[in-house]
Image (tube, rainbow, N blue to C red):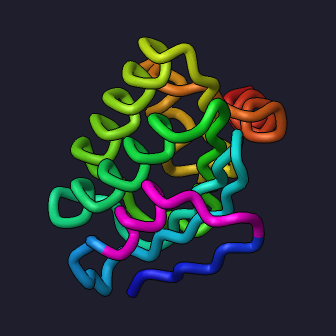
Amino acid sequence: MVDQRMDMDTSRPVEQSLQELSRSVDIAISARTDASRAEIIVSGELDIGTAMDLRSVLRAAVIAHEEMTIDLSGLTFCDCTGVATFVSIQNLAHRRGRQMVIGAIPGHLQKVLRLTRTVLADKQSARASTTQAT
């Protein structure tokens, strides 16, 4: 199921990527965008079967927007393919001089992302991660 709620002005590249998704029931991806910023909300399972769908949306967002925030509060599972997706998109954002922040990282994913140093997390997620580690 793909949720296409657009609260701000719609960005064509992100909207097109959302429309082109295979209709997976394992992951839901929605986006709110304006001219310079995209917020991508991900829920469900991110695995080998759904990672390409997310990668497509995130890639379009990085190309079209100066800033991107990824909200993972609804993510229930993430395998190594999902982590690789974040690494790939983070590298693309860096090469393009874009800002990418991953926020609301679920506990089961915080430690993996911190140990692999693959993503920048928002302050709230970073605090939660530090608190759990102590």
Picture residue at 67% right of the left edge, 29% below the top = 133
Q: Is residue 37 above or below residue 31?
A: above
Quarter of the rendering occupied by the N terminus: bottom left
Which quadrant of the figure has residue 112? top left
Picture residue at 35% right of the left edge, 75% below the top = 19
Picture residue at 67% right of the left edge, 63% below the top = 32
Q: Is residue 79 above or below residue 64?
A: below
Instruction: Give the overall secondary structure of the magenta segment.
Output: helix
Answer with left or right where residue 100 lies relative to residue 34. Answer: left
72 or 52: nearer the viewer: 52
Q: How many numbered markers are drawn?
A: 0
Answer with left or right where residue 35 lies relative to residue 92. Answer: right
| Residue 66 in the image, given as x and y percentages of width and height | 64, 30
Residue 74 colored in magenta in the image: no
| Residue 121 in the image, given as x and y percentages of width and height | 66, 32
Quarter of the rendering occupied by the C terminus: top right
Answer with left or right where residue 54 lies relative to residue 10. Answer: left
Q: Is residue 79 above or below residue 73?
A: above
Which quadrant of the figure has residue 13? bottom left
Which quadrant of the figure has residue 125? top right
86 or 33: nearer the viewer: 33
| Residue 33 in the image, given as x and y percentages of width and height | 67, 57
Picture residue at 62% right of the left edge, 65% below the top = 10
| Residue 103 in the image, given as x and y percentages of width and height | 68, 44
Q: Which residues are magenta?
A: 8-19
Q: Is residue 127 above or below residue 44?
A: above
